[in-house]
Amino acid sequence: MTTHPARDDVAAPAGSARAPLLSAAGLRVEFAGRGGGGAPARAVDGVDLDVHAGEIVALVGESGCGKTTLARALLGLERPAAGRVVFDGARLDYTARALRRYRRRVQLVLQDPTGALNPRHTVYEAVAEGLRIHEGTTPGEERRVSDALYRAGLRPPERFFLSYPHQLSGGQRQRVVIAGALVLEPEVIIADEPVASLDASVRGEILQLLLRLRDELGLAALVVTHDLGLAWNIADRVAVMYLGRVVESGAVDDTLSAPRHPYTQALLSVLPESGADRPEILSGEPPDPARIPGGCRFHVRCPVLASGEAQRVGVAERCADEDPGVLPGGTGSHVACHWALSDGSGA
């Protein structure tokens, strides 16, 4: 299988060694209000996010925070109301022909391998399907299917050619789905909760597979997950999303070892390895994305504001009235929190 080194002929942004392979810039995705009236729901409400060649970025947050919508927008499955998706230095073109070419280079791995695989298709047919869509039947098809299955850890690959999904374990089915993405030799995969439907005993195997693909092929990945423990084990960088915005981002070890945003701190506090004395239970549910609060969008649930700590350092009014803004992309550490950026916050 061909590896895909980072391109050197795309101008790198200031402060970066090279340009990101895939990025969102000021991205906003909206859905019509209930019944077709009222304010639109801002599922993604201004996001800058970069994924470089050969790195794994974890996109984490509660259910309903906009993670999957952002992933779909990066795949070209949702057209943004504002902002842009940039791949390999060029803005994403939404014409049918351009999207077809793009989706060969940026592949999706779904969370439910059972639902992703046609029960009437053999493993060979499932993996070859993408090739046939993009290239038709070619003389090298069997070799490429075999190579993809081998890369995905199904060995010897020929033993699985005539198997049907119901004859495989959950982990093997997920490997078939990954092989179906690899057969087109993509440069990026976007994996939406790739181990959520698997038994704990096989989750580690799939995560190790993704790490090996990064190391051997230079493959980049955006892994969408609600599980910060998974992010800690697999990602190079992490972006924490709340109510349509990235509220904290940075190198995974730095961000998850010393989280600065109260939302990230609360999410981490429930992990046994976090060392927290007790979990931080956030009050209430995330607000309706059609009625996003003013000021910091997290302030209505923020334990730092509720405890009086934000008042002590003099930022409580800013929390309620002033939007911290959209975080930049790139590889640095960033946080959208008045308290975390204030003196005396411990940041």
Image: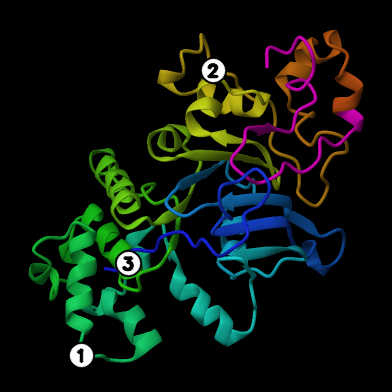
Q: Are marks 3 and 1 in contact (CB under 8 Å)?
A: no
> How would you rate the neighbour count of disc 2 (Cα within 10 Å): few for under 14, some for 14-19, many for 20 or more?
some
Nearest the viewer among 49 and 230 is 49
Left or right: 310 as drawn, with respect to 131: right
Q: Could you say where residue 234 lies in the image, as x and y percent from the top left?
A: 39, 39
Circle 3 residue: 182
Q: Could you say where residue 94 lies in the image, as x and y percent from the top left?
A: 65, 78
Left or right: 180 as drawn, with respect to 72: left
Circle 1 residue: 139
Amino acid type of the residue that numbered disc 2 sits on in the rendered structure: Pro
Quadrant location, the C terminus:
top right
Going 56% across and 59% down the picture, which residue do you hit?
22
Dot 1: element = loop
Disc 1 vs disc 2: which is toward the camera?
1
Nearest the viewer among 259 and 289 is 259
Circle 2 residue: 279
> How would you rate the neighbour count of disc 3 (Cα within 10 Å): few for under 14, some for 14-19, many for 20 or more?
many
Dot 3: element = helix
- Range of the magenta residues? 320-347
